[in-house]
Image: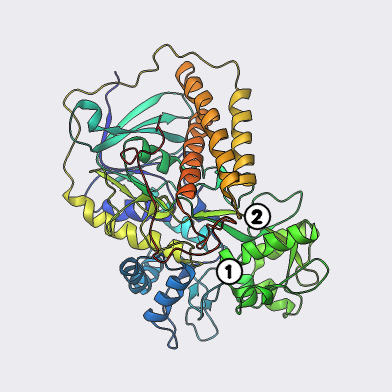
């Protein structure tokens, strides 16, 4: 057995939460960051809008809190909302200290944008590629830190659990696949931090990059961690509809700056669904578009910016403007064709206010975590804020963690597995899962659709389990295993909720229950097998 790589803190994921944690934790320990592709291949890097924070004189913490609670449709935890909102200005200052560039107005003050369901301008940004700018600065800082090692092209397979050694539940690291060499490495740590992002690739249509396969949720669930609110998958209302465009998001900031949603025939329609019209929250807008497309049979709706000053549009949204122009769409002259697509997981691995999960030694921060901030529907640009706030709190909390590594460890064993000569099984299962999840478990649900999805996923997971035992692990197989488990967890969580609330909309239960309650799912509570 090769000697395990030992560190103080193992971080799985390299987005805003993972890298900010690494920089802060490196002040008091050694950090290893594992990322499945390059350090910049993250959901953060794709974020266009910005970071929500109360910085304007006419804004207030209470108003940001209220906007978040309203968007969350009664399910946000107010304590968590207040914690994050009040930390917003300090998080923006931290970004500036790290060298993140943010747009400023003519007076030199930070330029504040507005997005859907916000009642004030409070979103700091860098053009329309805020996430890319944050990622750039964080990666630069991490690469030059003596206490941080970044392992790119490394994919976590499973978490190491002390329960497997006859001890109390606890996490002390992970088995990790080196995608370049094919070697499986053992990395041990006093604290393991999941910062692995979201689950968008569970659905065939998504704004997420290919790395968003729900790995953190799946790995945490398999060692017994509690998860929650996994039925609340946010579908972004406006993803570019074009045969040559893949996963290209059209930022909510366009609607914040005056963009109007129209049918392809030119009529507006959002006034029929909400008083805020095109600036309503994402769950409402996505359902409205879905309904209009089903009524009309059209392929898309249009996001119209043509009534705004062309120079302003080009200056405020240079990346979106150029990307659309390359596809023959001049957004200053014609409407942008858009459709909803899976975008953000509001639930995840259950944590406390310091990012600690129900498994000692295991933390979850960023999109992988279920903190209670987002409730049944995330308010735009609260996600990068949450990543900053919880990474800071987790970095302080892990100082008290002690080593849990057993004296004698079991090496990774492939058993009698061989190299696969039938990889088509992986690709077919992957495609089947993503398509039936879109058909049965997306924007509008019913009991019958969920039951069909549950039956399908159970059969597919049986096939995947056997394939996983028979053949050596590859990155595709690891991701498929995770996608399949997360899909089942989403389905079963949705089946538990007998109401329509936020992002969970079911034709069988159109009204809300009198009391808003989080959903929970874990192995201990009778959830599906984790293997």
Quadrant in the picture for residue 295: bottom right
**Looking at the picture, how far across and down is residue 166, in whole percent?**
19, 27
Q: Residue at x 22, y 37 (%)?
A: 169
**Looking at the picture, how far across and down is residue 380, in whole percent?**
51, 67
Residue 416 left/right relative to 314: left
Residue 383 left/right relative to 321: left
Determine contact: label 2, label 1, CB under 8 Å.
no
361 vs 498: above or below: above
Characterize the local packing of mark 2: few (<14), some (14-19) or many (20 or more) Cα atoms within 10 angstroms: many
Quadrant in the picture for residue 13: top left
**Looking at the picture, how far across and down is residue 82, in whole percent?**
33, 72
Q: Quadrant of the C terminus?
A: top left
Q: Is residue 364 visible?
A: yes
The residue nearer to you, when weighing 422 against 442, is 442
Task: Find disc 2 in the rendering and name its residue.
Answer: 248
Secondary element at image label 2: loop
**Looking at the picture, how far across and down is residue 434, in whole percent?**
60, 40
The residue nearer to you, when weighing 214 against 524, is 524
- Number of marks drawn: 2
The residue nearer to you, when weighing 519 against 29, is 519
Task: Find disc 1 in the rendering and name its residue.
Answer: 127
Secondary element at image label 1: loop
Characterize the local packing of mark 1: few (<14), some (14-19) or many (20 or more) Cα atoms within 10 angstroms: many
- Return the residue found at the far top: 416
Colour mode?
A: rainbow
Query: Which label lies toward us, 2 or 1?
Result: 2
Quadrant in the picture for residue 86: bottom left
Closer to the N terminus: mark 2 or mark 1? 1
Q: Is residue 146 visible?
A: no
């Amino acid at each position: 057995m090769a000697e395990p790589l030992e560190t103080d803190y193992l971080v799985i994921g390299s987005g805003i939460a993972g890298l900010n944690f690494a920089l802060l934790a490196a002040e008091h320990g050694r950090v290893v960051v594992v990322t499945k592709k390059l350090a910049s291949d993250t959901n953060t890097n794709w974020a266009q809008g910005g970071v929500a924070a109360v910085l304007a004189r006419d804004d207030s913490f209470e108003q940001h809190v209220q906007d978040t609670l309203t968007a969350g449709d009664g399910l946000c935890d107010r304590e968590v909302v207040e914690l994050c909102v009040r930390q917003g200005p300090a998080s923006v200052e931290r970004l500036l200290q790290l060298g993140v560039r943010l747009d400023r107005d003519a007076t030199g003050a930070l330029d504040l944008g507005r997005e859907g369901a916000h009642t004030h301008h409070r979103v700091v940004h860098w053009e329309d590629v805020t996430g890319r700018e944050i990622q750039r600065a964080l990666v630069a800082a991490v690469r030059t830190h003596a206490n941080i090692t970044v392992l790119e092209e490394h994919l976590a397979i499973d978490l190491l659990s002390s329960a497997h050694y006859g001890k109390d539940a606890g996490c002390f690291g992970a088995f990790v696949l080196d995608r370049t060499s094919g070697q499986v490495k053992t990395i041990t740590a006093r604290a393991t931090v999941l910062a692995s992002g979201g689950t968008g690739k569970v659905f065939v249509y998504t704004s997420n990059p290919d790395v968003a396969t729900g790995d953190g949720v799946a790995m945490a669930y398999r060692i017994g961690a509690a998860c929650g609110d996994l039925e609340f998958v946010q579908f972004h209302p406006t993803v570019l509809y074009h045969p040559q465009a893949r996963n290209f998001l059209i930022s909510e900031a366009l609607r914040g700056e005056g963009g109007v949603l129209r049918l392809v025939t030119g009529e507006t329609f959002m006034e029929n669904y909400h008083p805020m019209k095109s600036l309503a929250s994402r769950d409402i807008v996505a359902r409205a578009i879905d309904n209009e497309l089903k009524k009309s049979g059209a392929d898309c709706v249009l996001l119209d910016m043509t009534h705004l000053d062309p120079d302003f549009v080009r200056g405020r949204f240079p990346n979106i403007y150029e990307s659309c122009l390359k596809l023959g769409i001049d957004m200053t002259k014609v409407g942008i064709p858009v459709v909803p697509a899976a975008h953000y997981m509001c639930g995840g691995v259950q944590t406390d206010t310091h990012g600690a999960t129900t498994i000692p030694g295991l933390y979850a921060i960023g999109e992988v975590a279920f903190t209670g901030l987002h409730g049944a529907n995330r308010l735009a640009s609260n996600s990068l804020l949450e990543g900053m706030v919880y990474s800071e709190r987790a970095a302080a909390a892990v100082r008290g963690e002690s080593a849990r590594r057993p004296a004698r460890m079991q090496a990774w064993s492939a058993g009698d597995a061989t190299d696969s000569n039938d990889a088509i099984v992986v690709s077919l299962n992957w495609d089947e899962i993503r398509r039936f999840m879109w058909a049965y478990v997306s924007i509008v649900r019913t009991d019958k659709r969920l039951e069909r999805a549950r039956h399908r996923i159970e059969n597919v997971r049986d096939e995947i389990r056997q394939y996983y035992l028979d053949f050596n692990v590859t990155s595709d197989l690891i991701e498929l295993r995770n996608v399949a488990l997360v899909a089942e967890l989403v389905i079963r969580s949705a089946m538990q909720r007998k109401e329509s609330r936020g992002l969970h909309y079911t034709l069988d239960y159109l009204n809300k229950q009198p009391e808003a309650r989080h959903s929970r799912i874990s192995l201990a509570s009778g959830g599906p097998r984790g293997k």
